[in-house]
Amino acid sequence: MASGLPLRLPAQGINASQQLIKSDRGSMLTMSDDNVMMNQIVGTHAPDGREVDVKPLLLLVEDILKRATLQIDSSVTTSQAHAEMEDKTYHVNFVSMLDALSYTIDRISSEIAYKALGGTDAHATTVSLFNMLTSYSWDAKLVLTLSAFALNYGEFWLLAQISSSNQLAKSMAILRQLPSIMEHSGPLKPRFDAINNLIKVMMDVARCVVEFKDLPPAYISNEVPALSTAMAHIPTAVYWTMRSVVACAAQITSLTTKGHEFSISTTDAWELSTLAHKLSNILDHLRKQLDTCYQYIDEKRNVESFQMLKNLFEMIHIDNMKVLKALIYAKDDIQPLIDGSSKKRVHLDVLRRKNVLLLISGLDMSTDELSILEQIYNESRHHGARLDSLYEVVWVPIVDRSVQWSDPMKQKFESMQSSMPWFTVYHPSLIEKAVMRFIKEVWHFRNKPILVVLDPQGKVVCPNALHMMWIWGSNAFPFTSLREESLWKDETWRLELLVDGIDPAILNWIKEGKYIFLYGGDDDEWVRKFTNTARAVAQAARIPLEMVYVGKSSKREKIRRVIATITVEKLSYVWQDLTMIWFFWTRLESMLYSKIQLGKLDDHDPMMQEIKKLLSYDREGGWAVLSNGSNVVVNGHKTTALQTLLEYDLWKEQVPVKGFDLAYRDHQGRIHDISRPCCRFDFPMTTGRIPETMKCPECNSTMEKFSTFLCCHDEVIPDELFK
C-alpha cells in the first residue's frame, strides 16, 4: 500500500467526505462549505515518504487512555498483558522510534494546550495540527495526535489517582485544582462519561485507520473499489478524530483552569455527543469497507493457496510431511491431531512415511458407517505389524464456515471424535478454506464420506478407498487403485461377493450346497406370497431351500414392519440388525461406485450388469436372487420372481432334466422377455463421481438423465417415484 495519498483528494474523495459531513451541515462547521474545508485539510497533506510503524505507539496510547478513568476498566489486565507482549516484540525499534517522534508529540501537546487556553476555535486548532504534521501519512498524523492527548490526559488522571498516597503528586494536584475537582466528582460524572465515550470512539476509528494501512499490498491495491472508497474517506475520519481530540483536551483544560465551578454548558455537552455520533457513523462506514477488503484478501489468498495445493500434489516428495501440513496444519506451534487410542494431542510427525487414509466427512456421518469402519480398522490391527505400522487413518472434519459453530455442533463433533480409534484433526477450524475447496473440487467430496489414500510420499494413490474397504475390508490394503483393479480381476459373480462375512449362517448354507433365495423389498404382502410359494415349490421339487430377507436400501421404518411380519409369521430367515442390512446395500452400491471411479463401468461386464439390476430392482420395490450354493443362478424383479414360482406346474417337468436352478432360470427368462421391465438409478448429489452416461442392464439402451427432488425422510417418499 502507498505510504501516503496525493496532495488533493479526487472528486470522488470530496464527494465521499461530503456524504459523511452533510447530515451535520452548519452544526459542526465554522465554514459554510464542506468541500472547501476538506480541500483545506488535504492541502496540508504532503507526505515525504517516511514510514512510521504506529501500531506499538497506538497500543501504548490505548493502555494509557484505558487506565485514565475514574474507575479502571476491567479489561486493563488483558490490555496490560497485550501491551507487555507487544513491548517485547517492538522494544528496540519502538525506543528508536520514540526518540525520533517525542519532539513532535511534545509540540502537538503544547499546541493543543496553548490553543485551548487561548480559546482558539476548534477547527482552527485542528488545522494548525495538520500543518504541523504535513509530512506524515494519515495514520501517523492521527496516532501522533492521540499520543499527545494521552500524555496530557494521562498526567491529569495519574495525579488524581496517586495524590492521596504520594506527597509530590498531592502538591502538583493542588496546583491543578484536582482535590476540588475530585471532591465534586459526582456532579461532574456526566462530563467524564461524555469524554470517555468520545475517547472510545476515537480509538476505534484510529485502530480502523491503522488496519487499512496494514492491508497487504500483495493481495489488494487502490484499484479495488472497497479500498479506494475507504482511502477517500480516511482524511475525513482523521480530521474529525483529531478535532474530537481538541474538544476533549479543551474540556480538561477548562477543568484545571476554572475548577469544579466550571459547569458544563449546553453547547459543550452537545458538541461532545455530536462528535461521538459523527465519528460512530464514520466508523461504521469504514468498518464495512474494511470487512469487504478482508473478504477480498481472503478470496485472493484462498485462490493462491488452492493453486499451491494443486501444484503440491503434482510434485514428487521424499516423504508426506509437506502434503499433510498443507492439508491439515502448516505451523509447528500446536499439536493438530488427537491420537484415537490415547486421546492425547500429537504432532503430524506420527504420520511420517506412512500410508495415510484421510477419512473426510461432515458431522453427519452415520453410526452405521462409523461402526463398520471401526470394525474393519480393528480387524486390520489384528494382522500385526504388517498393516499396523504401514497405514494410519486420520479423520478430517469438514464444517461449513458460513454456519456459526454452535453447542450442538460442538457436542456432535466431540462425540464423533471420542468414538474414533484412529487419529482425528483436533478441531474443524484448523482446516483452511482453500483446503476445503480443494477437497470438494479436486477430490469430489460432496458431504458423503470419502477415504483418500496417500502413499508414504504424499501421493494420492486412490481418490476414495471407502468403496473397496466396504467390499473387501482390510484385504484391500494398501488401498490403491491398482489394488482395487487387481481385486476386481479376481472377483466372480457369486453369493459370497454379495454377503461377504455379514452373516456366517449363509456361508454355512453355501458349504452345504443348499439352494438360497436372497430377497428384499418393503411390500409385506408380496413377501408373504413369495416366501409361502417358494417353500411350497421347494417341498414339491424336494430341494433344500433357505431364504433370507435383506431388506431395502431405504425406508427403514417400513423395513422394520416387514421384519416384524416375517418374524411373527415365521416366513423366513431375516436379518434383525438394521446395520447388517445397511452394510449389505452399502457394499452393493460401493461395487457400482468402485467401477465408476476406476472408469470401468463396462456395459459388457456380466457381473456389473447383475449388480446394476439388483440396485435398480431395489429402487423399484422388490427382488429375489436364487443361488445354488455359491453360484448365483438368476437375479429377478419381484414380479417375475413370484410369477415364476406360481407357474411351477409349467416348468416342473424340466427340473429332473436341467435341475431346479436352471429350470427356474429359464422359465423366469421367458416371463422377463414378455414383461421386459427396465431399470432406473438414483445418484444423490452428495455422491462425488456420477457417470455421464449409463446403459440399461435389461435392454442395453442408453438411459435418460433426470433431476429428482426427494424428501430426506424415508417414510414420506412417494411410492410412485419408484415405479
Image (cartoon, rainbow, N blue to C red):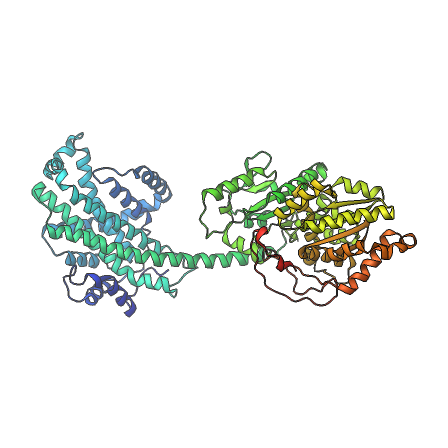
Against 389, residue 3 (above or below) is below
Q: Nearer the viewer, residue 49 or 454?
A: 454
The residue positioned 64% from the left and 42% from the top of the image is 392
Q: Residue 461: where, in percent of width, then height?
A: 67, 52
Q: Nearer the viewer, residue 335 or 620?
A: 620
Q: Would residue 595 be found to the left or right of residue 162 on screen? A: right
Against 450, residue 48 (above or below) is below
Q: Residue 3: where, in percent of width, then height?
A: 33, 59
Residue 464 seen in the figure: yes
For the N terminus, give its image quadrant.
bottom left
The residue positioned 74% from the left and 54% from the top of the image is 485
Q: Nearer the viewer, residue 97 or 640?
A: 640
For the C terminus, give its image quadrant.
bottom right
Residue extending furthest right?
657
Q: Would residue 493 be found to the left or right of residue 159 on screen? A: right
Q: Residue 630: where, in percent of width, then height?
A: 82, 47
The residue positioned 19% from the left and 33% from the top of the image is 162
Q: Would residue 464 be found to the left or right of residue 287 on screen? A: right
Q: Would residue 305 be found to the left or right of residue 242 on screen? A: right
Residue 141 seen in the figure: no
Residue extending furthest bottom?
11
Q: Quadrant of residue 75?
A: top left
Number of marks: 0
Q: Quadrant of residue 215?
A: bottom left
Q: Residue 536: where, in percent of width, then height?
A: 81, 47
